[in-house]
């Protein structure tokens, strides 16, 4: 059986020479077998083994399990770490199940023990565990991904015993007269997994086929292979029909409809997951809602989890997060340069204009002395632009759009209403009020992140260049820069 596990480890590239392997050992049959297997693997692949035992403080006799694991480690001269955490209190505080809290505590302890070391975390899941997971997801409702069971490798987690059934593990320990602890909570039917283990899977083995566990495990592997293929095709489909910005994810209708229906669903789910930065609570019903929206009229919207909203626009679906009230207030405020700021700018100092807590614009003037402009040096960056300062007639104001706003769009300085520009660029209506504008009265100098008005472009006649750079900024940095400027205008240079 050692050879079987070693071959499985090599097949899935779980362990490399010199790795530090952190083993989660509860003291039960599976984890004790895992520890013995790692000791055997160490004979073939030089590795460091470290053991972590987590006491959930649920059972009164849990301390006995910890003592047993510690004795095993002492006998093998292995580093042992005991972590004690009141899991029920954690679950109550975070409003999650005891099972989920226990899992979070365990994996956190394992990650902490491994730290930045090169290596993996070894968990003692076996074939039966994978089958129970398959059935649990099947009964509760799942996508194809949920029918893959438990994966042998996930990030830094490895499961060397997934090639063994629970019967094989217990037989191995009996043959070697190795004792192990029995967790009394595993014998109860308080958890869904225990019901599947004691009543459903056990009945299948006794009454349908003795090889039920192996058959389900094999099916999980085949589903996983199919899912890998679908995941690759989904990635290609996502890259084909999805356009992403810092605020939106857009699904192109024409390209989306060329995808297979199954792939369409996976592409939508991936788009929602990226927009939400999480997959939790995203379900098939939300995917179907977005797909149905594709056939709706332009302007129709739907509400989704994580404050997400999907909107049918001219060319497909736009997914975005609704701004909270505070963000809207910041965006709608107007920022006009004060006399002190204008004087500082004219004096050649770089001016930092703070926009709320998370953005800023850096402004500076460049004076040209009887020399032409090298147009090769004009920045072509999205968030850095040069302007002819001499053409700005009023005070510079940074704000969002207002009725009557316009810009010039060609060398003949033909005016275009800002609303018409947004429509031509197919910018969704709900996003238009979120654009930061640099304005000269009703004339829009710069739609930040989009384009500048042609009228303010630098030319051979330009004598003073205004440089503007838009940047993201942390709150602490913003507070520091605001204080620094106030001090500067109050205490000018001695010269």
Image (cartoon, rainbow, N blue to C red):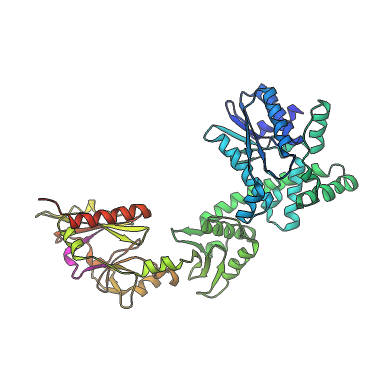
Relative depth, front residue between 206 and 454: 206
Instruction: Say whether residue 319 is magenta.
Output: no
Query: Where's residue 271, x and y in %?
Result: 54, 58
Instruction: Say whether residue 390 is magenta.
Output: yes
Relative depth, front residue between 452 and 198: 198
Query: Where's residue 457, x and y in %?
Result: 23, 62
Quadrant assignment, res 382: bottom left
In the displayed image of the protein, which residue is found farthest to the front? 60
Query: Does 40 appear above or below 155?
Result: above
The residue that appears at 58% across and 29% down in the rendered structure is: 19
Side of 493 where 415 appears, left or right: right
Side of 293 where 365 appears, left or right: left
Quadrant assignment, res 469: bottom left
The residue that appears at 11% across and 50% down in the rendered structure is: 494
Query: Where's residue 156, x and y in %?
Result: 59, 38
Q: Is residue 105 visible?
A: yes
Q: Is residue 14 visible?
A: no
Query: Does 33 appear above or below 223?
Result: above
Query: Where's residue 306, x and y in %?
Result: 54, 62
The region drawn magenta spans 385-397
The residue that appears at 73% across and 46% down in the rendered structure is: 220
Q: Quadrant of the N terminus?
A: top right
In the displayed image of the protein, which residue is found farthest to the bottom? 403
């Amino acid at each position: 059986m050692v050879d079987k596990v070693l071959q499985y480890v090599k097949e899935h590239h779980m362990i490399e020479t010199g790795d530090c392997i952190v083993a989660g050992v509860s003291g039960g049959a599976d984890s004790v077998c895992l520890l013995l297997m790692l000791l055997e693997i160490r004979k073939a692949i030089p590795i460091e083994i470290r053991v972590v035992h987590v006491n959930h403080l649920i059972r009164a006799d849990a301390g006995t399990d910890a003592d047993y694991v510690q004795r095993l480690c002492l006998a093998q001269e292995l580093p042992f770490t005991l972590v004690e955490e009141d899991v029920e209190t954690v679950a109550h505080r975070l409003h999650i199940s005891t099972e989920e809290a226990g899992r979070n505590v365990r994996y956190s302890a394992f990650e902490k023990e491994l730290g930045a070391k090169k290596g993996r975390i070894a968990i003692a899941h076996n074939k039966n565990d994978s089958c129970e997971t398959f059935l649990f997801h099947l009964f509760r409702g799942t996508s194809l991904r949920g029918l893959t069971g438990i994966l042998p490798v996930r990030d830094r987690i490895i499961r060397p015993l997934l090639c063994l059934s629970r019967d094989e593990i217990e037989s191995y320990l009996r043959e070697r007269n190795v004792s192990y602890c029995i967790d009394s909570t595993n014998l109860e039917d308080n958890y869904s997994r225990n019901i599947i283990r004691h009543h459903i899977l056990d009945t299948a083995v006794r009454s349908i086929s003795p090889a039920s566990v192996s058959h389900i495990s094999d099916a999980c592997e085949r589903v996983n292979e199919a899912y890998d293929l679908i995941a690759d095709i989904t990635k290609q489909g996502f890259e084909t029909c999805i356009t992403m910005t810092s605020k939106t994810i857009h699904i192109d209708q024409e390209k989306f409809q060329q995808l297979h229906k199954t792939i369409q669903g996976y592409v939508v789910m991936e788009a929602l997951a990226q927009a939400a930065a999480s997959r939790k609570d995203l379900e098939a019903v939300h995917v179907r809602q977005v797909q149905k929206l594709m056939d709706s009229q332009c302007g129709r919207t739907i509400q989704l989890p994580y404050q997400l909203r999907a909107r049918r626009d001219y060319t497909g679906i736009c997914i975005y997060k609704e701004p909270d009230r505070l963000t809207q207030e910041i965006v709608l405020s107007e920022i006009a340069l004060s006399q002190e700021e204008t004087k500082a700018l004219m004096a050649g100092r770089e001016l930092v204009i703070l926009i709320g807590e998370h953005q800023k614009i850096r402004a500076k003037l460049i004076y040209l002395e009887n020399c032409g402009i090298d147009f090769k040096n004009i920045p072509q960056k999205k968030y850095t632009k040069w302007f002819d300062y001499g053409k700005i007639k009023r005070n510079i104001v940074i704000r969002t759009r207002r009725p009557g706003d316009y810009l010039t769009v060609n060398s003949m300085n033909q005016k275009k209403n800002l609303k018409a520009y947004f429509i031509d660029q197919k910018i969704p209506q709900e996003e238009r009020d979120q654009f930061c504008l640099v304005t000269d009265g009703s004339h829009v100098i710069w739609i930040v992140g989009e384009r500048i008005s042609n009228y303010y472009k630098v030319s051979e006649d330009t004598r003073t260049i205004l440089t503007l750079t838009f940047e993201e900024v942390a709150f602490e940095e913003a507070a520091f820069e605001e204080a620094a400027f106030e001090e500067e205008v109050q205490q000018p240079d001695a010269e």
